Image: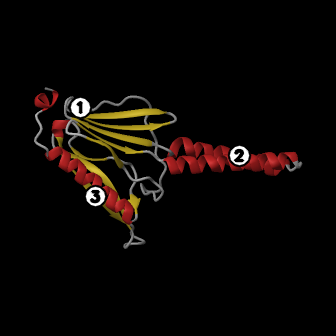
Amino acid sequence: MGRYVQGRKANSLEINGISTHITPMKIATNTPEQLILQNVPWAAGLTICAAIVALVGWALHNFTNGDTFAGVMLTLIAIAVGIIFCVAVKRIDVLFDRSRNLFEIRRSTVFGRTRVRHELANVARAEVQTYSSPREPNKKFHRVAVILDGGMDEGTHPLTASFENGRIAERKANDVAKAINDWLAQDVDSDAMRA
């Protein structure tokens, strides 16, 4: 099946691939036929929207009080925060579908959706990748990656662009990797499932 990319490529906003404010990936559906994982950054999106509203309100207050310079500066800051929202807030859906022999990663931003598709038969396993900062070796960052052992895109494919830090992020990453590996290890006959 190879690789299929649709829509505009989504950019990510993180420093050296590390982000500390990302919502951990969650299991949305886990049936013998499908495993669906989601990363929906509600908290980040709502926080950025609240910051934009506050900045616009503060800018309007300055404009009505005659402080045009402060109003213009706050408006420019609100626009910059809006651009950060458009680039940084990214929904990620990962689909494992036995009936269609499909492994798909979908990334959505306000600019559009990117889909990367692989044959499920090429998925070997999932693993948690861990990164330690050279400046803070005790601080660990984690993300889930899927290993493909066949096809054109053989190799390691991270499900998220950024790493997440903290004990909760580590536990969630381990839970998601275990769920993927357990789902892949199920001995399920797709034809028998549909009957």
Residue appearing at x 41%, y 72% in the figure:
136
Q: Which mark is residue 140?
A: none
User: What whole-number distance in Å separates the C-alpha atoms at marks 2 and 1?
Assistant: 44 Å
Q: Position of residue 191 (x, y in %)?
A: 12, 28
Choose between 194 and 119: the one closer to the eye.
Answer: 194
Residue appearing at x 20%, y 42% in the figure:
154
Amino acid of disc 2: Leu
| Contact, mark 3 vs mark 1 (Cβ under 8 Å) | no
Q: Position of residue 83 (x, y in %)?
A: 59, 43
Q: Which residue is mark 1?
A: 2
Q: Which of label 3 and label 1 is nearer to you?
A: 3
User: What whole-number distance in Å separates the C-alpha atoms at marks 3 and 1?
Assistant: 28 Å
Residue 73 shows in the view: no
In the rendered image of this protein, does residue 31 appear above or below residue 170? above
Q: Which residue is mark 3?
A: 174
Left or right: 107 as drawn, with respect to 53: left
Left or right: 173 as drawn, with respect to 53: left
In the rendered image of this protein, does residue 137 appear above or below residue 173? below
In the rendered image of this protein, does residue 189 appear above or below residue 176? above
Q: Which residue is mark 2?
A: 76
Secondary structure under the numbered disc 1 in the rendered image: loop
Mark 1, Cα crowd under 10 Å, few <14 / some 14-19 / many 20+, is few
